[in-house]
């Protein structure tokens, strides 16, 4: 058994290192602690699934334990108190546990390292790895189902953009493939071509084809802010849509194999302010 398994896994990343805002000041202060409880649970589960030190069986056992803590089927251990805190948060807010449990389905898939062979496989993975985040936020803010499809599209677009940012590192460090394998094969490529120092013309076509899919998702997500009844959640949504568009544009222009493609602080601020302004003008 690994050393990490003996002491228990720990989340390795904070919300400040994420691509998109978590519990920002746009959200009501009273709800931000609930968002953070959800985030800490998800961050811990994600880092378990991504661990390079844990064996597959250990990852699955830790994820099962988190699930049991969340649902009250097991007491928390020192490393898994995030599960107990989220259980308390859900009891207080009245939000169902199913959103967090659906995310655990995706993390179990990550632990199994099954590749996404097709675009449909990737969308199905995002059904569990991304869409529940937006659905949780909607439930927490008392939204009905009206914004649901646009929220699903945005969350899926964000997840795929993150996969493209990390496509080389995911394969190098974890043997994990989120770029559709059949699209690579159609260009005469395989997953190992993601280890190249830069993209050639064939891989660039695959990346752009994936970004074409993101374009369609962002078009579906475009009306999200105005479909939200909760004004502040609508503003938050507008900011995130605009940030996603900017990151998509950067991934069109730059090569994620040759460099880390991300938004600068200035670009993030400009995108955020632009999103807020656009949302206010539409209301």
Image (cartoon, helix red, strand yellow):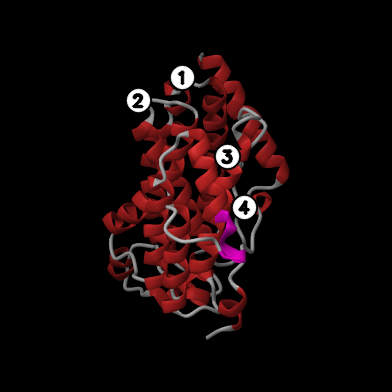
Q: Which of 104 and 245 is in front in this view?
A: 104
The residue that mark 4 highlights is 262
**Residue 78 is a magenta residue:** yes
Q: Give the range drawn in magenta.
A: 77-82
The residue that mark 1 highlights is 229
Sooner in the amino-acid sequence: mark 4 or mark 1: 1
Secondary structure mostly seen in magenta is: helix
SS of the residue under disc 1: loop
The residue that mark 2 highlights is 146
Instruction: Name the disc covering residue 34, or none.
Output: 3
Q: Which residue is drawn at 68% across and 50% down?
A: 16
* Number of other residues with Cα within 10 Å of mark 1, as a class: few under 14, some 14 to 19, many 20 or more: some
* Quarter where residue 275 is shown: top right
Placement of 115 over or under 240, stated as above or below: below
| Horizontal arrangement in the rendering, residue 144 relative to residue 16 (left or right) | left
* Quarter where residue 96 is shown: top left
Placement of 150 over or under 261, stated as above or below: above
* Number of other residues with Cα within 10 Å of mark 4, as a class: few under 14, some 14 to 19, many 20 or more: some
Placement of 6 over or under 274, stated as above or below: below
Whole-number angstrom distance, CA of label 1 to CA of label 2? 9 Å
Q: Which mark is in front, 2 or 3?
A: 3
Q: Where is residue 204 in the image (x, y as percent from the top left)?
A: 44, 61
SS of the residue under disc 4: loop
Instruction: Name the disc covering residue 101, or none.
Output: none
Report if the CB atoms under discs 1 and 2 are less than 8 Å apart: yes
């Amino acid at each position: 058994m690994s050393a990490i398994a003996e002491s228990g896994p720990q989340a390795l990343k904070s919300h400040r290192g994420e691509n998109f805002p978590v519990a920002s000041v746009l959200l009501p202060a009273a709800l931000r602690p609930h968002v953070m409880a959800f985030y800490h649970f998800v961050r811990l589960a994600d880092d378990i699934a991504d661990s390079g030190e844990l064996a597959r069986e250990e990852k699955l056992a830790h994820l099962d334990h988190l699930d049991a803590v969340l649902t009250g089927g097991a007491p928390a251990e020192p490393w898994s108190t995030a599960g107990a805190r989220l259980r308390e948060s859900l009891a207080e807010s009245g939000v169902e546990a199913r959103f967090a449990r659906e995310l655990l389905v995706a993390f179990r898939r990550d632990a199994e390292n099954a590749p996404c062979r097709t675009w449909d496989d990737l969308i199905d993975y995002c059904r569990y790895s991304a869409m529940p985040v937006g659905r949780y936020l909607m439930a927490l803010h008392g939204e009905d189902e009206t914004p649901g499809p646009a929220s699903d599209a945005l969350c899926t677009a964000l997840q795929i953009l993150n996969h493209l940012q990390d496509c080389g590192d995911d394969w190098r460090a974890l043997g994990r493939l989120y770029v559709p394998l059949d699209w690579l094969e159609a260009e005469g490529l395989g997953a190992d071509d993601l280890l190249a120092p830069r993209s050639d013309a064939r891989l660039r076509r695959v990346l752009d084809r994936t970004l074409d899919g993101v374009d369609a998702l962002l078009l579906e997500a475009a009306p999200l802010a105005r479909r939200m009844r909760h004004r502040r959640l609508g503003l938050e949504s507008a900011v995130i849509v605009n940030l996603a568009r900017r990151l998509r544009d950067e991934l069109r222009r730059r090569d994620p194999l040759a460099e880390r493609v991300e938004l600068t602080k200035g670009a993030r601020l400009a995108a955020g302010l632009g999103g807020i302004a656009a949302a206010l003008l539409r209301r």
